[in-house]
Amino acid sequence: FTPDSSLAVVVSDAYLAKIDLTVTPLVPELIELESSVLDPPSAEEVILAADGSFAWVRQFGATDLLVVDLVSGVVDAVPAGVNPTDLDLSPDGREAVAVARGSGELWVYDANRPFAVPAIVPLPLSSQFGSLLFDPTGDQAVVYTTSTPVERYGVWDVSTGVVTERS
């Protein structure tokens, strides 16, 4: 949902549904994510730019994120490291962040300019972190794993880019 609750998006493996919540009746506009793909990858997650201009889609096993221009309906891809396993939007809506578990990185995108070069923040080498959760201020985020029984997590200081590992 956009912050003003005027727009919602829902993602399935093959389509993204754009729903204008200001009109009645509600009629989803379907945008095909990957044309000519018979068996598209499973779409696991979608986030929406705060201004409703773009949706970001993370697919299982993909190395790119799909970026859907919600005005034109054009779908394009941006690199996201090896094995992105989480996607989050900063509390202020300015940044989209992908956690690339396979390459041990955070990929930080300008949420309103998705094709600008992303900042890449390295994660501790031994971490296997694959998930991210921002604090409400957006000043820091916790990075962690739910895939292995690891008794540590990281704290990402957004302003400095430093990730500190904690037990």
Image (tube, helix red, strand yellow):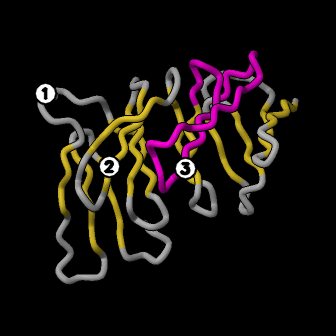
Where is residue 117? Give x, y as percent: 53, 37
- Left or right position of 104 against 82: right
- Give the number of the mark in front: 1 or 2: 2
- Left or right position of 47 against 152: left
Secondary structure of the residue carrying tag 2 is: strand
Bounds of the magenta segment: 100-129
User: Residue 113 in magenta?
Assistant: yes
Which residue sits at x=64%, y=32%? Answer: 120
Q: Earlier in the sequence, mark 1 or mark 2?
A: 1
Residue occupied by mark 3:
110
Question: How many numbered dots are placed on residues in this image?
Answer: 3
Which residue sits at x=77%, y=55%? Answer: 139
Kindly identify the amino acid type of the residue bearing the numbered disc 1: Leu
Q: Tell me, yes or no, whether the two marked residues, 1 and 2, touch with CB atoms within 8 Å.
A: no
Where is residue 125? Give x, y as percent: 74, 17
Q: Is residue 55 above or below residue 84?
A: below
Q: Quadrant of the N terminus?
A: bottom left
Q: Earlier in the sequence, mark 3 or mark 2?
A: 2
Query: Is disc 3 surrounded by few (<14), some (14 to 19) or many (20+) residues within 10 Å?
Result: some
Where is residue 133? Give x, y as percent: 66, 47
Residue occupied by mark 2:
68
Residue occupied by mark 1:
38
Nearest the eye: 79 or 27: 79
Q: Is residue 152 above or below residue 94?
A: above
Query: Is disc 2 surrounded by few (<14), some (14 to 19) or many (20+) residues within 10 Å?
Result: many
